[in-house]
Amino acid sequence: MKLIIQIPCYNECGTLEQTVADLPREIAGIDVIEYLVIDDGSSDGTAELARRLGVHHVLVNPSNLGLARSFARGLDYALGAGADIIVNTDGDNQYYGGDIANLVQPIIRHEAEIVVGDRETGKIEHFSPGKRLLQKFGSSVVRTFSTVRIPDAVSGFRAISRAAALRINIVSSFSYTIEMLIQAGHKGMAVASVPVRTNAKTRDSRLFKSIPSFIKKSGATTLLMYAMYQPLRIFSAIGAVIAIIGMIPIIRFLYFYLFFSGAGKIQSLVIGTAMMTAGTVTFVMGLLADLVGRNRQLMELTLERVRNLELRGRTGTVGAVTENQPVGKELDD
């Protein structure tokens, strides 16, 4: 069984050496362990440092694509390199590499397809009370939308089986952590969580500039991903709200028409009718979006099979994959 540990990096020369030093060389149940650094357009020589440190694979983005796209490229590359399990960790040495052995065990035992490291954020000293509360609230929102019960939903420290990686399609440009859990929940994947340790803070997060910015982007990603998989629920809810609001002026018109003079109240009927029509149109849009969603599911099944065929075709040349060489469609970048 082959494990590839991928590390998305952007200007991580200051922390990459310690991050790599902490990674395991041997794990029970794993035959081969290799490291993959995805350099997301760094300007500080991160890729060169990775090579000097003996990292097995170095994938360089031609420009800064962002964490989500770098993560997706890493998955694609690792699959092409023959990984049976892929572990994702951060280049800022936030996560304790020694816990990777615990992270992969549920996959080795065939108990889970995705395992998320629980940082137990309530115990992290450098997290402010507000940030702890935000992490707890955010994870509960993701659990609601994904139906996956994970205490630390935005943790990037996670292990993914080969089968799960083939089925995951990251389309978000901001947060792969949320999107992956929503996809996993709606695709019926087995997801588990294990406690992991964290190291002392080395720098501020580069993923977002402020807490309000993080809330805005995470909320938008969560809603968009949920709408992708449950469009009928979203549009039905919106349509129902519009229709209920539209009923209010109609009821007002009927009240005055039946018990008093209806003169001068016709505008209530017009407004109410317009809103009821809008609610109906919104519901129909939900039906159409649901049909499109069914078609997307068929396309994802087709994509999964194409990926399998592609990777089987490379079986005899997996060992020849060279550093910096992406796989699949990424070859054309």
Image (spheres, rainbow, N blue to C red):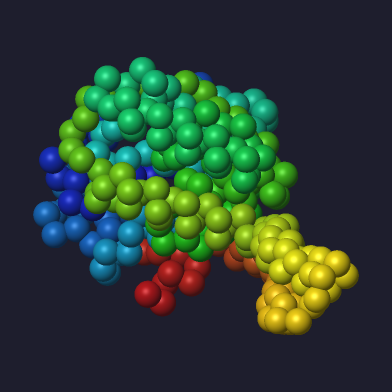
Q: Residue 13, percent across and down?
A: 15, 45
In this view, the residue in front, 130 or 186, is 130
Screen quadrant of the N terminus: top right
In this view, the residue in front, 292 or 306, is 292
Q: Quadrant of residue 203?
A: top left
Residue positioned 63% across, 62% down in the render: 228
Q: Against 312, is 95 above or below?
A: above
Q: Residue 243, percent across and down?
A: 74, 66
Q: Residue 147, percent across and down?
A: 67, 40
Q: Against 235, is 156 above or below?
A: above
Residue positioned 55% across, 49% down in the render: 180
Residue positioned 29% across, 50% down in the render: 208
Q: Residue 170, percent across and down?
A: 51, 58
Q: Quadrant of residue 97?
A: top left
In this view, the residue in front, 269 or 294, is 269
Q: Against 283, is 147 above or below?
A: above
Using the rendered image of the protein, determine whether residue 7 is visible from the camera's viewpoint. Answer: yes
169 on left or right of 215: right
